[in-house]
Image (cartoon, rainbow, N blue to C red):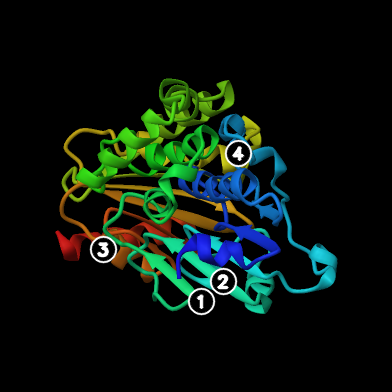
Amino acid sequence: MTIDEFLSEAKTVAIFGHVRPDGDCVGSTTGIYNYICDNYPQVKADLFLESFPESYRIVRGSSDAKNLYTASENGGVPYDLVFLMDTPSFERIGAGGAECIKSAKKTINVDHHISNPLNLCTLNLVEPEASSASEVLYVNLDKNKVSKETANSLYLGIVHDTGAFKFSCTGKRTMQVVGDLIEKGVDFAKIVNETYYTRTYKQTLVTGYVMEHCKLGLGGKVVYAHITPEDMARFDVTPVELSNVIDTIREVGGTEVALFLYPVNGKYKISLRSNYIVDVNAIAREFGGGGHTRAAGGDTAEAPEKAIEKILSLIEKQL
């Protein structure tokens, strides 16, 4: 069955992404939300997303998102259909949605993580070679039903997971999809400028601080840094405002891997990026995480210095 066939049978739909939503998570979730609103007015659709960067509110539907699912949603009864977007495991579901998706009558997983087991939902549309969940979603929708607003969401997702088309996950089909979205009238210049290339003043200050204190390891092949809760308090930033720091760190020339740790909920979030050689997904799995070959993450309760030492050892084995 197709996504449209599932939607034609549903009266109530819930949509979830992963914890700490990034651009692709927000893009794919609002993308399917807008698609439903535009084409299935008889369907009651609820979107659930944890906090995300304010700049992502440029896309329609983002302001409709609820931060947390509760048992009273949908009158306390299971949803007919639940979408799980850009999420490779039940443990990674954001906004408290794990119980919701487990109780739903039917479910659809749209994803591109290599760590996805491919059996989470009733329908699993998972392509590890795709640039983004937003790309996977687009190729599984009726192109004639994709509006400009849906296209804006999908473009946001693709831009962020390809690093504005710089990362190796960018393929021929990715650019063909982008071409289709541009034909829909997508606000491509505004979206890429305001959500990818710009930062708030506080983000600029804290990113500068991290870059000033980053270090090189393994003969200059790794650039790494971490930030403490005290640092975050001094700069008055939240984890949401630190999510893109890793993409600035990785710009240091001559490095293969970029590593950044920052506090989240009493632990340290580990962000990893690589260019050509290192499989950072394999490293992230050692910390209960995962993702992609060139971009992955996990969590640790250890002191950041100790965790970094372990991660450098794992990277060295691959190098």
Mark with earlier residue (3, 1): 1
> In the figure, 192 relative to 70: above or below?
above
Amino acid beneath label 1 = Thr
* Element on which disc 2 rests: strand
**Of 288 and 78, the residue lying toward us:** 78
Dot 3 amino acid type: Ser
At horizontal 45% and vertical 65% (from top left) the residue drawn is 2
- Judged left or right of residue 99, residue 17 is left
Of circles 2 and 3, the one toward us is 2
Rendering coords of residue 90 (x, y %): 55, 72
Residue holding disc 3? 313
Q: Please determine whether, in this image, residue 31 is positioned above or below residue 120.
A: above
In x, y percent, where is residue 222? 25, 47
Disc on res. 232: 4
**Amino acid at circle 2:** Thr
Question: In this orientation, does residue 162 appear?
Answer: yes
Say which mark, if any, is on residue 107. 2
- Residue 266 seen from this side: no
**Which residue corresponds to mark 1?**
122
Crowding at mark 1 (Cα within 10 Å: few <14, some 14-19, many 20+): few
Q: Label 4 vs label 3: CA separation?
A: 27 Å
